[in-house]
Amino acid sequence: MPTDTQNLRRVLFVDDDPQFLELTQELMGVFSNGQWEITTAVSASAAFAVLQDHPVDLAVVDVQMGVMDGIQMLSLLNRGYPNVQKVVLTGFANENYRAACLSNGAELFLQKPTNQEGWRSLFTALNELLKYKPEEGFRGVLRRVSIPDVLQMECLARNSSVLEISNGPKQGSIFVEEGQIIHAQIGDRTGEQAFNQLLSMSGGNFSLKPFTEPPARTIEGPWEFLVMEAARQRDEAMSAAAESAPPVESIAPVAGEEPVLIDVETGGPLAAESVAAPAPKTAAATVIPRPAPTGPPPKVEELVICSVHGEVLHQWQCRNVDVWINFFEFVSQRGQRLAQALPLGKFDRLEIQSGDSRAVVIIAADRGVMVKTGKQSVLK
Amino acid sequence: MRASEEAKQRITDWLRRSPSVRGVLVRGVRFADQTFVSDFDSRDYPVGALELAWRSVSDTFQVLTAHRLPPTRLTWVYERSVLHCVRRDDGSILGLFVAKNLVEQSREGVDRLLSEFISLKVSSR
């Protein structure tokens, strides 16, 4: 059997059916003729434990594995292992779920094979995917992964670490030892009270540090319960705050600061707008003050500009920023993959016509931009 | 509603019969059953890469539809080429790769092909 380590591809299959994994390992081993190093895991936690010690090129994941659903697992894989290519393999093919998996980082969404031809097709599809290198691109998921997500990942992988969380003057830490939460502190508070406060903080930053012995061990019990209880308390606090808050008036646009997008090829204006939108706080290469309007003004309906890590630099009337951040990542992945496969040159933008609306998604080296216009758009 | 074998054949015949348009490098149709046909064979556009392209386009239609922005037309703009795509109600997708420097000259012919594809009657009933 060939053992060309240079071309050896490492593939991890995750499924809660050990017999399916056994069959997969056997057949893929035969088809790959020794060119794949195949590992398997029977659960999400086992998969993260494997990934901790054995880097892989491709993770093939079943989406129905009880404790953690496929979307959640894809998010955690994206967060912890952004360079691992991800494929969903399922016996349950629902079109909406397929779309959700694709927009959450899955490169392929495939049906579990049921015959020899199906197994061969599965191998061909995965092997084709392995020919392409994962590209550095838009990784919005880094922003969207929450503190509970990171904790869940650390606990599932039975890691030992310290999660440091800061939000302005507030700073705290959560200590995880071999997958168990053993201590939390913020200010004078410790234990579950501190843990709940840390998980209730909105915004701020967090970072994972190597494990150090905590000053005390103040938390016991299953981590799943702690995370769920903190989420419940947070939901209750948010509901109470919403009930007591005064009604919020819609935000009026700021007049006189209308941006115009510049066509990256011609340097000319790409879109103008009839409705004023506030300019981004940071100067963006693609956005400049608008010159005097020359033609029929189009109507900008939504605008969002994000950093490559998914931080929103500017948004205007965007009804669901997270959806667009997911889509930036999807377009970045697909756009660059096509540029690798075909002689197209560098990916520039995707234009979407949808009924009366039109949207343009631009993935630049340092940001993603989406502008959606109404029927009167003059986008060319 | 997926295209039947007969409908697929009619679409394939239409693709082969349609006059070429200056600037269009490759024309291809991907059907809802994931098979595809192309009217061009080139080392620059190998079958595996085209399969990837059509799949990416199909995924994009599906993801946007799930996000309540069902596209009627997608245009992928690259440094050297532009890929125009439309999807019929039966899930078939027409993709046209156009040389970037001939985008303007090809516009009319491309628009005609795309609208012909959308309105193509393929049912024998």
Image (tube, coloured by chain):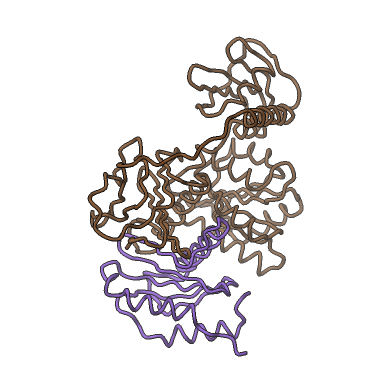
Chain colours: A brown, B purple
Q: Nearer the viewer, residue A185 or A246?
A: A246
Split into 4 quadrants, where in the image is the C terminus of chain A? bottom left
Q: x%, y% of residue B49?
A: 45, 66
Q: Is residue A179 above or below residue A16?
A: above
Q: Which of the 4 quarters of the picture holds residue A147? A: top right
Q: x%, y% of residue A230?
A: 68, 27
- Residue at 30%, 63% (x, y): give it: B80
In the drawing, does residue A378 fall left or right of residue A63?
left
Q: x%, y% of residue A373?
A: 40, 56
Q: Nearer the viewer, residue B14 or A120?
A: B14
- Residue at 47%, 71% (x, y): give it: B86
Q: Which of the 4 quarters of the picture holds residue A46? A: top right
- Residue at 67%, 60% (x, y): give it: A94
Q: Nearer the viewer, residue B23 or B47?
A: B23
Q: x%, y% of residue A228?
A: 71, 31
- Residue at 41%, 48% (x, y): give it: A303
Q: Nearer the viewer, residue A230 or A21?
A: A230
